[in-house]
Image (tube, rainbow, N blue to C red):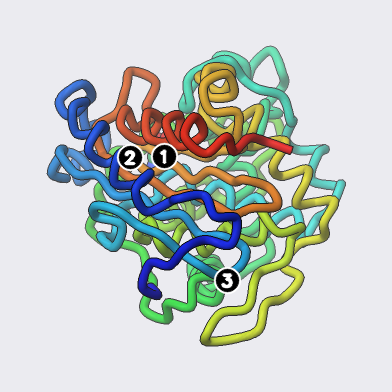
Amino acid sequence: MPAPQAPANSTPLIPILQQIHTEAQALFGQGQVADYIPALAQVAPRQFGMAVALIDGSTFATGQAHTPFSLQSITKLFAFVLALKLEGEGLWKRVGREPSGAAFNSMVQLESEKGIPRNPFINAGALVITDILTSRYAHLDIAMLGALRRLTDAPDLSWNGHIAKSERETAHRNMAMAYFMKSYGNVLNPPELVLDNYCRQCAIEMNCAQLAQATMFLAHNGQDIDTDARPGEQFLSPSDARRVNALLLTCGAYDAAGDFAYRIGLPVKTGVGGGIVAIVPGRGTVAVWAPELDAKGNSVLGAFALERLTQLTGWHHG
Ligand code: GLU
């Protein structure tokens, strides 16, 4: 990461991030690390990192912004973008685009809605997206890592085998959902194979600085920005980037999406590893990580840090 420098918009990001870091530490102990995936329960709870990347290429960080963590549901964003690039509008025959208002791993809506998940960012929806990608790629993990390594300029980016195995061995609810959706014809591949791919995807690790860089195309009309390693490219069309941001705003924080929109007002994706990524369209991206979660599975310190950042900078959606 380049040394901190004054951002082009002259917002004093370095003291703002330092202030947020100090304030956030008062919230340690208010949440709990995810423990339904046994390997995640081993993560030290009192950790906090935050990185801001701006579209002019400058980056700013505080705390453990370079410590890798388990992306978990944040990968649903990347999987969805890959599927959207491949399938286009046809995708919407198999998954909806409405907030679920239910827990990330809830199955209650699936029966009345005939195996069509509410959106791609809850587990059921992500399993359908994984099924779509499984039909397209013989080695989905390699395809996914290839895209993410390019976006982050990190050739060693990978998934954590210990966490993937731990989730796979305890994925009873996700397996049940995959079989249930298969009964409606909305999972085409063997559920075991879909779950193998899904658990590897969830176990991908990145640090905050990498996550901010990887999502930059969403802040920049679908276009990745130039880095020291390579020129930027149009990763997604500008209209699709706008649509993805709209979905993140309405569906990116499980059944707390409304609360996040109210408090933070930015497109976000959260994960039970304690990470949150937020998009500030036209300006940049913010990644924050703190493993202690609230009852809905969102990072306590992460949500606080994003709320404070929007208060202190005036950044908002649109
Ligand atoms: N791998 C997790 C699961 O399927 C992801 C959940 C999350 O991050 O919300 O339960």
Label 3 Cα neighbours within 10 Å, binned few <14 / some 14-19 / many ≥20: some
Label 1 with label 2: CB-CB less than 8 Å = yes
Residue 104 rendering spot, x and y as whole percentages: 48, 27
- Examine the rendered structure and indicate whether residue 20 appears above or below residue 145: above
Cβ(mark 1) to ligand 1 < 8 Å? yes
Percent of width and height locating residue 258: 58, 18
Disc 2 crowd, CA 10 A, few/some/many (<14, 14-19, 20+): many
Left or right: where does residue 141 sit relative to residue 133?
Answer: left
Q: Residue at x 69, y 42 (%)?
A: 245
Q: Is residue 291 above or below residue 285?
A: above
Residue designated by label 1: 271
User: Looking at numbered disc 2 in the image, what kind of residue is underneath it?
Assistant: Gly
Q: Which residue is more in the foreground, 200 or 68?
A: 68
Q: Amino acid at mark 1?
A: Gly
Q: Residue at x 65, y 84 (%)?
A: 231
Among numbered discs 3 and 1, the one appearing first in the sequence: 3
**Residue matched to label 2:** 274
**Is the Cβ of the residue at disc 2 closer than 8 Å to that at disc 3?**
no
Residue under label 3: 147
- Check whether the beta carbons of the residues at disc 3 and disc 1 lie within 8 A of each other: no
Considering the numbered disc 1 on the image, is that residue within a helix, a strand or a loop? loop
For residue 16, what is the image quadrant? top left
Q: Quadrant of the C terminus?
A: top right
Disc 3 CB within 8 Å of nearest ligand 1 atom: no
C-alpha span from label 1 to label 2: 6 Å
Residue 266 x/y as whole percent: 60, 35
